Amino acid sequence: MRGNLFAVAVDLVVLTVRRDQLCVLLVRRGERPYESHWSLPGGFVQADEDLGDTAARELATQTGAATQDAVQGHLEQLAGYAAPDRDPRGRVLSMGYLALLPDLPDPQGAAAFLPVEDVYGLAFDHDRILADGVERARAKLEYTTLAAAFCPAEFTVSDLRRVYEAVWRTEIDPRNFQRKVTSTPGFLIPTATRVTGGRGRPPQLFRRGPATALHPPMLREPLPVPV
Amino acid sequence: MRGNLFAVAVDLVVLTVRRDQLCVLLVRRGERPYESHWSLPGGFVQADEDLGDTAARELATQTGAATQDAVQGHLEQLAGYAAPDRDPRGRVLSMGYLALLPDLPDPQGAAAFLPVEDVYGLAFDHDRILADGVERARAKLEYTTLAAAFCPAEFTVSDLRRVYEAVWRTEIDPRNFQRKVTSTPGFLIPTATRVTGGRGRPPQLFRRGPATALHPPMLREPLPVPV
DNA sequence: CCAAAAGTGTTGTTCGTACACCCATGT
DNA sequence: ACATGGGTGTACGAACAACACTTTTGG
């Protein structure tokens, strides 16, 4: 069997929405190369693991396994990165994975959620992996129900709308959005309870429904804020 | 650097449309494992190559480098496959790549274009890679101009429509299709020449335009032929 | 003349956008 | 009472589906 040998790693683009901002989980590297640079969380694929196993394991350890149990987050493969010089230690292929999670408590240790717009100069080629992950997330909100993966188990239509607005950096008419999502069969399941304590009319609470596709898709307009 | 070492290969899903059928390029294996089984063309990533380099090299060698020059085909990364037992020889990660090409002359040696519907029992996990590639191609025709990658340099609207019909296994109204594609700016560029010799009114010839996205997308209806 | 394929016009319907308007709560 | 946010009704326009119709060739 010809061909060189590679170390194979999984790097995670873990996205969440915090205070109406799209944020990514980063860890500060404690070792060379790129010591003390921010990087995406990740790790090497072990002997009996498939790629998805590694991604799920890393996600659980980086965010706390207990919270991960209760969370109906989303995890999917993104792309493979294997430029010959991407890691000075040798030939490393990294599979990017994209995770969408509800807002979690601040992680332990040298990790933090930072707004994606403030992030530059990550270790290795992680700037590109992050950009690919963000673009994938933006595109998938258009034609899937994945926006609900950013919300807790029960949420309002406004919560969901603020997810779209944060990820796309745009504004959406609340009234048309309401009709759009509530009229898509299987997207949102109303619960018995309502929210109290806020200003204005108490909103209906919803749970995620079984639908995964959005027909017809949500339309994303050209961003009003270019860069 | 912990983690096991992998051989890294690239496997190609090369699709084309022949006689109104979506076809895939397969090679008959001449060695073990899976000797004499059909498999996707592929090969190992060499020392100084990035993944895309390997994919382009394999595509050129498998289809003939000369033809590849003239062809404005499409090549994109598909997904990574690394199940621990996917190759009995050891740990191999394979990056799937998707290529869309115009109809080419029959390849040399133990290779052939076969209709995707007739293909089962490929070597390794290539059935799954093929299924992922076909689904990606079907989805991308909806919202991109990639259907033109299946056509030669100059083609008619009917040629393009037959591509959609073959890939989606559906029928499209020729009149509405005509308006749809000719009214999308940058999709089709008319040429001076027309076709002669066929029955009926000679059609206009077009070249591919610079547009890549299709707004609004082409609508794919539920397949009339389920499986 | 007739068949066949290319291409245009027209009509009804669906769906998004914009916005007027009502509902239910806290202060 | 009034501000605030939740939620509904409606009018206008863009785009698609269906199909009648014209154009231009070969036989």
Image (cartoon, coloured by chain):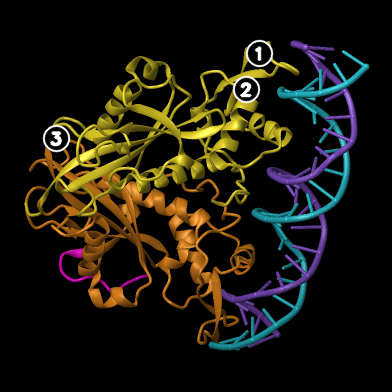
Chain colours: A orange, B yellow, C cyan, D purple
Q: Residues within 10 Å of mark 3 (few under 14, many from 20)?
A: some
In the drawing, does residue A187 fall left or right of residue B196?
left
Chain that bears disc 2: B
Marks 2 and 1 share the same chain: yes
Q: CA distance from mark 2 to mark 1?
A: 9 Å
Q: Is A110 inside the magenta-drawn segment?
A: yes
- The residue that disc 1 covers is B195
How far across and down, in percent of the image, does residue B139 sit? 50, 45
Residue at 41 percent of width and 66 percent of height? A150
Chain that bears disc 3: A
The residue positioned farthest toward the front in the image shown: B36
- The residue that disc 3 covers is A3
Residue at 64 percent of width and 63 percent of height? A176
In the image shown, does A14 or B225 lie closer to the viewer? B225
Q: Residues within 10 Å of mark 1 (few under 14, many from 20)?
A: few
Q: Which residues are magenta?
A: A102-111
Q: Looking at the image, is mark 2 or mark 1 earlier in the sequence?
A: 2
In the drawing, does residue A102 fall left or right of residue B204?
left
Q: Is residue B191 above or below residue A55?
A: above
Disc 2 vs disc 3: Cβ atoms closer than 8 Å?
Answer: no
In the image shown, does A154 or B204 lie closer to the viewer? B204
Q: Is B215 inside the magenta-drawn segment?
A: no
Q: Residues within 10 Å of mark 2 (few under 14, many from 20)?
A: many
- The residue that disc 2 covers is B156
Residue at 46 percent of width and 67 percent of height? A148
Secondary structure of the residue carrying numbered label 1: loop
Residue at 37 percent of width and 20 percent of height? B68
Disc 2 vs disc 1: Cβ atoms closer than 8 Å?
Answer: yes
Secondary structure of the residue carrying numbered label 2: loop
How far across and down, in percent of the image, does residue A200 sit? 58, 80
Q: CA distance from mark 2 to mark 3?
A: 44 Å
